[in-house]
Image (cartoon, rainbow, N blue to C red):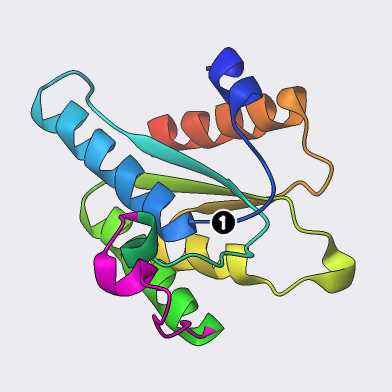
Amino acid sequence: AKNRLDRLPCGGGSPLAHGLSTAVRVGMNALSAGEVGRCMVVCLTDGRANVTLAKSNGDPDAIAPDAPKPTQEDIRDEILDISKKVGLAGLQLLVIDTENKFVSTGFAEEIAKAAGGKYYYLPNANDATIAAATSQAIAAAKAS
């Protein structure tokens, strides 16, 4: 997992809705195949999504040069809707917020709440703090 995380590109467009929906699909497939008994989605985000699910999926209407630009409210609503589905699907969500509180929107915490998940604020996250937060969340999930 660490090697994969090290290779992830950062910066630029943030298709958070796409990432969450893909994680739900992977988790649901693993659960239905009996590969795992429980599934926890770990979402590292600064809460600044700016790409809709339609655009990240290559929907022609969303990627056309004259396509209307979605509002932040549209993107926010889409992400919160998907977050709710994470919880309804029986998956657990851990949101690790990397946003600087000086310019914080608090959206990452809203994502966790919408899914009934856990929230950790780690503005200076590194591999050790992410691993520790994830381990704590997994331990808490196992205890419940």
Q: Find the magenta span and give its range.
A: 57-71
- Magenta run includes residue 52: no
Q: Quadrant of residue 54?
A: bottom left
Q: How many marks?
A: 1
Give how far across and how far down residue 51 sits, in percent.
49, 64
Looking at the image, residue 4 lies above or below residue 111:
above
Nearer to us in this view, 138 or 69: 69
Give how far across and how far down residue 69 sits, in percent.
48, 82
Residue 116 shows up from this direction: no
Residue 80 shows up from this direction: yes
Magenta stretch prevailing secondary structure? loop
Farthest residue, direction top: 3
Could you tell me which residue is drawn at 12 percent across and 21 percent down? 34
Q: Residues within 10 Å of mark 1 (few under 14, many from 20)?
A: some
Dot 1 falls on a residue whose secondary structure is loop
Could you tell me which residue is drawn at 62 percent across and 63 percent down? 47
Quarter of the image that includes the C terminus: top left
Nearer to us in this view, 110 or 75: 75
Q: Which residue is mark 1?
A: 14
Give how far across and how far down residue 20 sits, in percent.
39, 51
